[in-house]
Amino acid sequence: MTTSDQAPRDLVGFLDFYLVQKAPFQIPGEIREFLVKFGYLITPWIALVLLVLLLPGLLLMLGIGTAMVPFGGVGYAAGFTYLITVVLLAQLVLLGLALPGLFSRKKSAWTLMFYSQLIGILFSLLRGSFLGAIIGGLIGLYVLFQIRLLYVN
């Protein structure tokens, strides 16, 4: 095995190696062309929709934590629910920070989306959705790394 056949040791390089270079399916050239021309119009709106979809989850977590105080005590409400709420809030903040850069196709916005995706995987794991974290995480990271070249500094 030559050094070019080995995956890099950093996380972004490792994921790029397996989700782009060694992926069994690459987005076809004409679709990549379409994404280069029109993808910057679509991706920020997807992030905006995700923000809107995640906001009720955050409000629900805050409500469940408050509702559980009489039954589980303050310890329960401040424990598990607090951790999940903080993780979800971090994902929302990263998505919100990425939006302006997504419209102008900046690499820094892609990086924020990457971190948001990782936090989303953590959120699924904390909720106990292991299969969802694996499948959703792989699909999300695959698409994210396939469009990575669309974002420049």
Image (cartoon, rainbow, N blue to C red):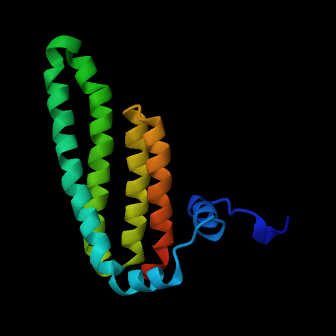
Name, please, the residue furthest toward the right. 1
State whether residue 50 is above or below residue 82. Answer: below
* Image-quadrant location for residue 64: top left
Residue 99 appears at what percent x and percent y?
26, 69
Q: Is residue 87 left or right of residue 96?
A: right
State whether residue 52 is above or below residue 123. Answer: below
Residue 93 appears at what percent x and percent y?
26, 56
Residue 67 appears at what percent x and percent y?
14, 22
Q: Is residue 124 left or right of residue 25?
A: left
State whether residue 134 is above or below residue 107. Answer: above
Marker count (numbered): 0
Q: Is residue 59 left or right of residue 104?
A: left
Q: Residue at x 67, y 59 (%)?
A: 9
Q: Residue at x 49, y 78 (%)?
A: 149
Q: Which quadrant is home to the C terminus?
A: bottom left
Q: Which quadrant is home to the N terminus?
A: bottom right
Q: Residue at x 48, y 47 (%)?
A: 135
- Pick the residue in front: 68 or 22: 22
* Image-quadrant location for residue 4: bottom right
State whether residue 80 is above or below residue 94. Answer: above
* Image-quadrant location for residue 113: bottom left
